[in-house]
Image (cartoon, helix red, strand yellow):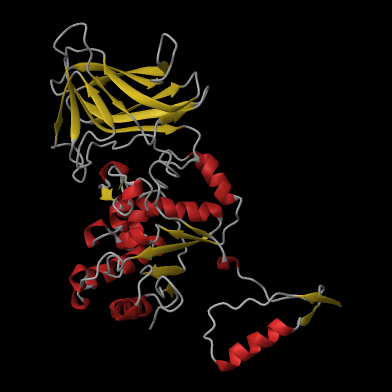
Amino acid sequence: MKNFIVPIILINVFLNNSTLNAYNSWEKENIKFQVDLKGEGIEIPKTLYGIFFEDINFAADGGLYAEKIKNRSFDFPNPLTGWIPFGEFEILNDGPFEKNPNFLRLKSPDHHEKHTGIENEGFFGVSFEKDKEYRFSVWAKVPSDGKAKLKVQLTDPGSLSESQDMGSSYMEIEGKDWKKYSTLIKAHETVSKGRLTIFLVKPEEAVDLEHVSLFPIDTWKGHENGLRKDLVEKLDSLHPGVLRFPGGCIVEGTDLNSRYQWKNSIGPIENRPLNENRWQYTFPQRFYPDYYQSYGLGFYEFFLLSEELGAEPLPVLSVGLSCQFQNKDEKAHVPIDSLQPYIDDALDLIEFANGDSDSYWGKVRIGMGHPEPFNLKYIGLGNEQWDTLYTQRLKPFVKAIKEKYPEIKIIGSSGPDSEGRTI
């Protein structure tokens, strides 16, 4: 047995006369504690610590999600955000994907020595590494039902050499029906702030492009719609007990329209609609008007990542409240008697994660490639929300979930500090 001098730390103590007197006495003398170094303490559950993922500062698109192309479906409010077009082109909005209707048409330039094409700036640059391969893919067609040829190029606009071409591939597009085309490009230089450039090589034929994509071949676990291997390896090294997703404030949204909606984040990635990121407008000193969520990193991918990290998944859903800091008027929130669609979203999510092939949402998960359930045990309802606005809305969620899924543990919010009220 040994004696140790231990500092006393008071956390969230309501000070009254007795605690003040005790604190004063601690100041006058050292308190001695006996610590048994061989004694066994209580077991710490693995779920006490883990990862809280928040899509802020381009943490998803441009970060953990390995996609290198910004605005790959031309569906930002400004359809050419992230793109530099040249030559003859136009944007049309009757494409093959209902939730992402825009597409780009490249047309013949007005001179045989001119070029038509488009260049993407990526997320603060399109980065690529020497001798590594990248998968370029695009949905395309030739409106005249003929043939067109594209040159796809990894470009270094800052190169001082004769050529800016740092790796390229040719692609032939044929027919008037939309098809997915792909090719591999090997980079022969390392560039951190490059671009992806697409040239129309056969100018006699126009070509339509939709969902332009560029991924490294070497993603985490080799997933085609994958995550950055280097970043996930760092997450994996933390040995997290839990992975909370898709974030905090993005669950609420600046308003209800911009809240994260999990059902929009599953299914074919080409048809996952764009969502305005809640962090776009928050800080004028760090303003990103091009901050949108492609939902390419969606709930299915979050569940899969949790499984591969050996962490319990902890999805967090909206309870019908937009951000309380940004919305002081109660009209900004869903009335209590109109919450049923939000409650259904919570129940459907549990079915998506754990349901079998006889359930609607279980069948959706199986169709996406995961026959076994994700074994969801926890669900979060609301983020940094408090007082009666929150508790009145939380109660019907708790009631519905406990009735249908009594085994699911519900995690609420006490607000942004320890003084928030819960049920």
Q: Which residue is outermost to the right?
A: 1
Instruction: Please state the horizontal and vertical placement of residue 247, each as a whole percent of the image.
Output: 40, 58
Q: Is residue 111 left or right of residue 131?
A: left
> For this rendering, which residue is in front, 226 or 44?
44
Question: Toward which corner of the image does residue 269 lie, by quadrant?
Answer: top left
**Is 375 located above or below residue 166 in the figure?**
below
Image quadrant for the C terminus? bottom left
Q: Is residue 12 left or right of residue 178?
A: right
Instruction: Please state the horizontal and vertical placement of residue 108, each as a whole percent of the image.
Output: 16, 15
Q: Is residue 205 left or right of residue 275?
A: left
Q: Is residue 20 left or right of residue 34?
A: left
Q: Residue at x 30, y 70 (%)?
A: 319
Image quadrant for the N terminus? bottom right
Q: Residue at x 31, y 63 (%)?
A: 252
Instruction: Please state the horizontal and vertical placement of residue 145, each as a whole percent of the image.
Output: 15, 21
Q: Which residue is outermost to the bottom?
A: 18
**Is 295 located above or below residue 353 in the figure?**
above
> For this rendering, which residue is in front, 358 or 179?
179
> For this rendering, which residue is in front, 297 or 27?
27
Q: Residue at x 44, y 13 (%)?
A: 160
**Is 50 located above or below residue 216 in the figure?**
below
Q: Is residue 384 visible?
A: yes
**Is 208 located above or below residue 14 in the figure?**
above
Q: Is residue 373 visible?
A: no
Q: Which residue is outermost to the top?
A: 113
Q: Residue at x 42, y 43 (%)?
A: 65
Instruction: Please state the horizontal and vertical placement of residue 416, each as a whole percent of the image.
Output: 41, 70
